[in-house]
Amino acid sequence: MKYFFLDTNVIIDVLANRQPFSESSARLFDLAEKGRIVLMMSALSYSNIYYIIKKSCTHKEMISLLSDLEHLTETLDVTKEIISKSLSTEFKDFEDSIQYNTALSNKKVEAIITRNVKDYKGSKLTVLTPDEVLSAL
C-alpha cells in the first residue's frame, strides 16, 4: 500500500472544483476510495479548507464535505513538537512548514502531493504533483 500526504491545495482543488487541477486530484480520491492508496492530511487543513470554501456554500454543506473528506483520508495531528520544528525551518510559508513537519511525523508517508512543488524545496520526502503520482501508479 502506498501512503501519500496531501497538501491543502490539492484537497481544495477537488472540493472547489478548481479547473484544470481538480480532475487529477479527484482521481487520487477515487484510488483512495477503492483502497489502492492511503491519503493522509494534516488536522490543520480542515480549518483552512473550511475558511476558503465556505465563501461558496453553506455551513451545513461545508460540514458534509469535511465529513466525506474525513472518511476518505487519515488525519494526522499537529502537535507542539511539530509547531516547534516548523518555527525553526527555512520555509518561507509557515503553513507549508507545518504541513511538511506533519507529513514527516508519520513514517508511513512516502511522498507529499502538492501543486506547488517549489514550496517544499529541500524536503526529505519525495514531493510530487497529482499528475506525477498518477503516472507513477
Image (cartoon, rainbow, N blue to C red):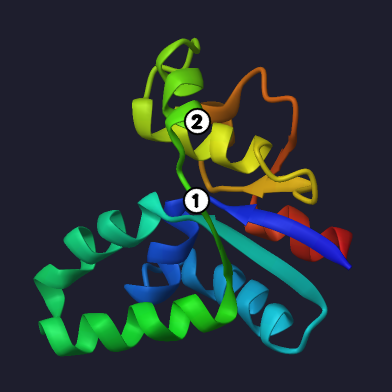
Locate the N terminus and report the quarter of the image it occupies: bottom right
**Residue shown at the point (35%, 77%) measured from the top left:** 66
Q: Are marks 2 and 1 in contact (CB under 8 Å)?
A: yes
Residue 86 lies, in percent from the top left, at: 46, 22
On the rendered structure, is 45 left or right of 82?
left
Which residue lies at the image location 61% right of the left edge and 60% below the top edge?
40
Judging by the rendered image, the residue that carries numbered circle 2 is 82
Extreme-front residue of the structure: 80
Q: Position of residue 131 (x, y in %)?
A: 69, 59
Q: Nearer the viewer, residue 93 or 88?
A: 88
Q: In percent of the image, x 13 and y 76: which residue is there?
A: 56
Residue at the spot of label 1: 77
Q: Is residue 132 above or below residue 95?
A: below
The circle on residue 117 is: none
Q: Amino acid at mark 2?
A: Ile
C-alpha separation, residue under disc 2 versus residue under disc 1 = 9 Å
Q: Element type at marker 1?
A: loop
Quarter that holds the C terminus: bottom right
Mark 1 or mark 2, which is nearer the start of the sequence? 1
Residue 129 position (above or below residue 100): below
Vertical order, 5 against 60 (above or below): above
